[in-house]
Structures are given as C-alpha cells and as structure tokens.
Amino acid sequence: MMLLILGVAAALLVYLFYALFKPERF
C-alpha cells in the first residue's frame, strides 16, 4: 500500500516539475 501511494506521489511530483521546467510542452 505504502509503495503504491509513494509511487503515485512521486509520479505527480515529477509531472509537476516537468510542467514547470517545460511549460512549452505542457
């Protein structure tokens, strides 16, 4: 359970950071 939650949270953080660093590709 914890691993799944951590995985989802990490994916969301990576997506947000990618969107912030690359707004053109958003």
Image (tube, rainbow, N blue to C red):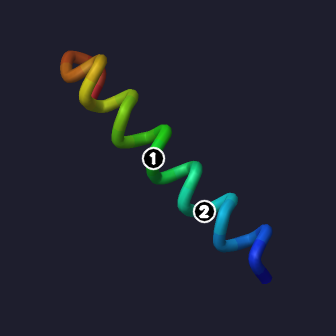
Q: Which of 19 and 25 is in front in this view?
A: 19
Q: Which residue is drawn at 37% across and 33% down?
A: 17
Please indicate whether residue 7 sits to the left or right of residue 13 in the image. right
- Rendering coords of residue 10 (x, y %): 58, 51
Q: Nearer the viewer, residue 18 or 2?
A: 2
Examine the rendered structure and indicate whether residue 19 appears above or below residue 15.
Answer: above
Marks 1/2: CA–CA distance: 9 Å
- Spot the residue most to the bottom: 1
Examine the rendered structure and indicate whether residue 23 appears above or below residue 5.
Answer: above
The amino acid type found where label 2 is placed reads Val
Q: Which mark is residue 8?
A: 2
Dot 1 or dot 2: first in sequence order is 2
- Spot the residue most to the left: 23
Give the crowd class for mark 2: few <14, some 14-19, many >=20 residues within 10 Å. few
Residue assigned mark 1: 13
Q: Which residue is drawn at 20% across and 22% down?
A: 23
Q: Which residue is drawn at 29% across and 18% down?
A: 22
- Rendering coords of residue 6 (x, y %): 66, 64
The amino acid type found where label 1 is placed reads Leu
Give the crowd class for mark 1: few <14, some 14-19, many >=20 residues within 10 Å. few
- Rendering coords of residue 8 (x, y %): 60, 62
The C terminus appears in which quarter of the rendering? Answer: top left
